[in-house]
Image (cartoon, rainbow, N blue to C red):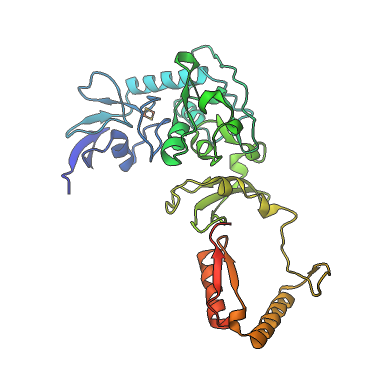
Amino acid sequence: MENKITITIDGQEVLANPGQTILECARSVGIFIPTLCHYSKTTNVGACRVCVVEVENARSLVAACCMPINSNMVIRTNTEAVRNAQKMIIELMWSSGDHNCLTCEQNGQCELQNLVYWLKIDKPRFEIEAPGYALDNSNSMIQRDLNKCILCGRCIRACNEIQVNEVLDFSMRGSYVKVGPAFDEDYISSSCVFCGECAQVCPTGAITFKQAKFAGRPWDLNKVRTTCTYCGVGCQMDLFTKDNKIVKVMGNREYGQPNEGSLCVKGRFGMDFVAHPDRLKKPLIRYKKNEDFKEASWDEAFTFIADKLSKIKKENGADSIAGLSSARCTNEENYLFQKFMRAAIGTNNVDHCARL
Ligand code: FES
């Protein structure tokens, strides 16, 4: 085991592991340092500098998210110099975009908005120069508004390092720099697979879920953790609902396994079936060939199935029956199904579709 080292943060002695960053050490003892470009499980790039802190004997303020600690380091997170720098950074970000919170889907959960409030900034001291980019409305799942992009690069790292889709990157140079797919294509023309990770990690309203727009403010939504029903992986997700309808789906990061907060296109955007009027909610039975299906009660359906299976088994043996289950069932349901086939029917003819 590596030897611990001692550092001091805001007068508090902290025992830490060599190699940890200042940010990690501060968070481990509940000291708040604001961040924007930092996103755990991706590379620390130190792009936004909003996490600056004072380190005794350092020539200038340092970015806490990417500065490793040294033994006996003395760090101050809340001095006047630190706050002035943070205010300047946030004001520059604010003034270089069109951060119109009135219509922004992220209002109430925007990390830039939160920091403006936390730093008590009334308005930026610089003239607002919104870049005037056109909205990317090219698809029905993700909306991109680069006027609200703060160039933190979280979406790029999430796309490349977490999902490994390698669709997003910075393009252009200087004040023209922007984030997007290659050749400045819109999402639908690019190689984007619509996992939605970019929208999940975006700290502002630059990349948002389109179906969530005007469907409910963050404080109107209920959050329910559930398991994705699409395949056997069992990804953990949070459904955000309003009036019993799913407004948006986020990967659950707290629970961790198995997906560690990430989702694929199906789990993220394929949830319309839950409230679809065509969804079957009651059993349908076709009693005679060429007849239409008729709605039935569950008791009727189970009796019908049991009678038919018993008759087939009696006349042709258990191995004349096979059962196909589904990857969309839970592990427990699939376990019960194979148990039913083996123990109740008496056959090993059981399989399931491992995909959809
Ligand atoms: Fe540290 Fe952006 S959070 S530089």
Rendering quadrant holding ligand 1: top left
Residue 137 location in percent, x, y? 64, 30
Taking the spot 56% from the left edge, 77% from the top edge, the residue there is 341
Q: Position of residue 269 (x, y in %)?
A: 60, 45
Looking at the rendering, which quadrant does residue 136 occupy? Answer: top right
70 relative to 291, above or below = above
Residue 123, visible in the rendered structure: no
- The residue sitting at the bottom extreme is 314
Quarter of the image where the C terminus is located: bottom right
Residue 98 or residue 278, whichever sits in front: 278
Instruction: Residue at 26%, 38% (x, y): give it.
Output: 20
Total residue callouts: 0
Q: Which residue is outermost to the top?
A: 127
Residue drawn at (18%, 43%), measured in percent from left and top?
4
Q: Is residue 168 found left or right of 313 in the rendered image? A: left
Q: Judge from the rendering whether residue 10 lies leftward or rightward of residue 37; answer left or right.
A: left
| Residue 246: image location, x then y, percent | 64, 48
Residue 255 position within the rendered picture, expressed as x and y whole percent measured from the top left: 44, 52
| Viewer-side residue, 336 vs 113 | 336
Q: Is residue 190 left or right of residue 115?
A: right
Using the rendered image of the protein, determine whether residue 210 is visible from the camera's viewpoint: yes
Quarter assignment of residue 97: top right
